[in-house]
Amino acid sequence: MKNKFRALSKISLVLIYFVIVAGAIVRMTGSGMGCPDWPKCFGYYVPPIEGKQLLFEPNKNYQKGMMILIENEAFLVAKNDFTSENTFDTANWEVYDKHDYVAYDPVHTWVEYINRLIGVLSGIPILIFSVLSFWFWKKNKWIPIISTLTLFGMGFQAWLGKTVVDSNLAPYKITVHMVMALLIVAFILYLIFASKTSYKPQTFQRKFYNILILALILSLIQIILGTQVREFVDEQTKLIGYQKDLWLKYPTLNFYIHRSTSILVLFLNGYLWFLNRSEVLGFNKLKLVVYCVLLEVSTGVMMYYFDFPFLSQPIHLVIASMLFGIQCYILLECIYKKRQNQLA
């Protein structure tokens, strides 16, 4: 049972990172409103593949919630189930007024739809391991508690996704959505660590522990600032189009803080790597941390100085999320060694 639980936790972690990748691609392609409603897409379980499917059709069975597009001016949504007649009857329809976004693009729709499918898929192993987690109740009550919190977190994340769509991609809601995804990552990493059967020989050092906490907090702040910079870029795209060399011509203060703080991130994590190596502490995953930081800096430089090369934005976000996850896992290792020292 323990092996199954841990395997499901690992599968969940991989799928959550796939969700983050998919979300980053949605942002890069501007597909966030590809489905203007939630949880369905234009009122369908499987969205339309071409625009004519959103035009009014006579003698068609419409279900409550299905949408039609009227001359790119408004979405109308069916009030109830009905079969349309030869002439359009306004009594069967009402204007979809949760936001003012009125457009259909098949690429955007399917990019967003696939993003949602991956999100649903990631919830399946979480649901299963949440049930299995109660097998650990006598040994470690935190495992079923965190498992249940993860399950509720996924539900809350889905609701946040709905509010993001209903608000037509309100910036602060996108930021909260991202932070919630990182919290779910942290929960799953705890479950993976707590269900281990053996632990590597490592040494707890107070200085290393304190700097690691600071580095983790700084990574989270950087991700939040980076999300806000990305939101600024989205606004610039709407204003001036895809003139990439102009997106950061007049950036906000958040951009300068984000860029400058990256130097501190590089220094702190480099120092942690040095401490771990010189003191032989045994936290070998710090190599991955250094690689992630170097990739983060590299993609950041590419975006600013080389006008956002293809895939540089999603890679930048995904690597930042991976950095946060690895740091969380190392912190869990530190806490475990700290408790061992206290019990000795």
Image (cartoon, helix red, strand yellow):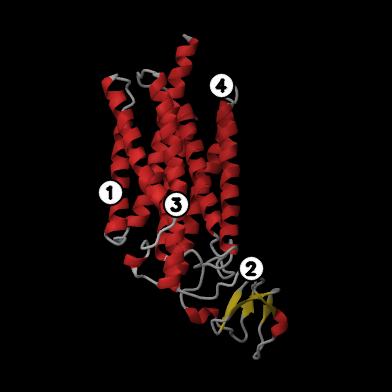
Residue type, mark 4 in image: Lys
Q: Extreme right residue here?
A: 91
- Describe the element under mark 4 as helix, strand or loop: loop
Q: CA distance from mark 1 to mark 2?
A: 40 Å
Question: Which one is closest to the eye, mark 1 or mark 3?
Answer: 3
Task: Look at the numbered discs 1 and 4 and tell me whether their residues touch, using CB distance below 8 Å.
Answer: no
Viewed as shown, does residue 307 lie left or right of 23?
left
Q: Nearer the viewer, residue 195 or 166?
A: 166
Q: Which residue is identified by label 3?
A: 254
Question: What's under tag 2, amino acid-wise?
Answer: Lys
Which label sits in the foreground, 3 or 2?
A: 3
Question: Residue at point 29% right, 19% down?
Answer: 280
Q: Residue at x 36, y 48 (%)?
A: 259
- Asked which secondary structure carries label 3, the reply is helix
Q: Alpha carbon of mark 4 to alpha carbon of mark 3: how far? A: 46 Å
- Give the residue pinned by disc 4: 139
Mark 1 residue crowding within 10 angstroms, few (<14) / some (14–19) / many (20+):
few
Sequence order check, earlier mark of 2 and 4: 2
Q: Which residue is mark 1?
A: 298
Question: Is residue 161 shown to the viewer in this render?
Answer: yes
Disc 2 marks which residue?
98
Circles 3 and 2, Cβ within 8 Å, touching? The answer is no
Q: Is residue 22 above or below residue 213?
A: below
Identify the residue at image location x=43%, y=35%: 216
- Extreme residue toward the bottom, this view: 87
Q: Quadrant of residue 82?
A: bottom right
3 or 2: tag closer to the N-terminus = 2
The circle drawn on residue 85 is none
Q: Nearer the viewer, residue 192 or 236?
A: 236
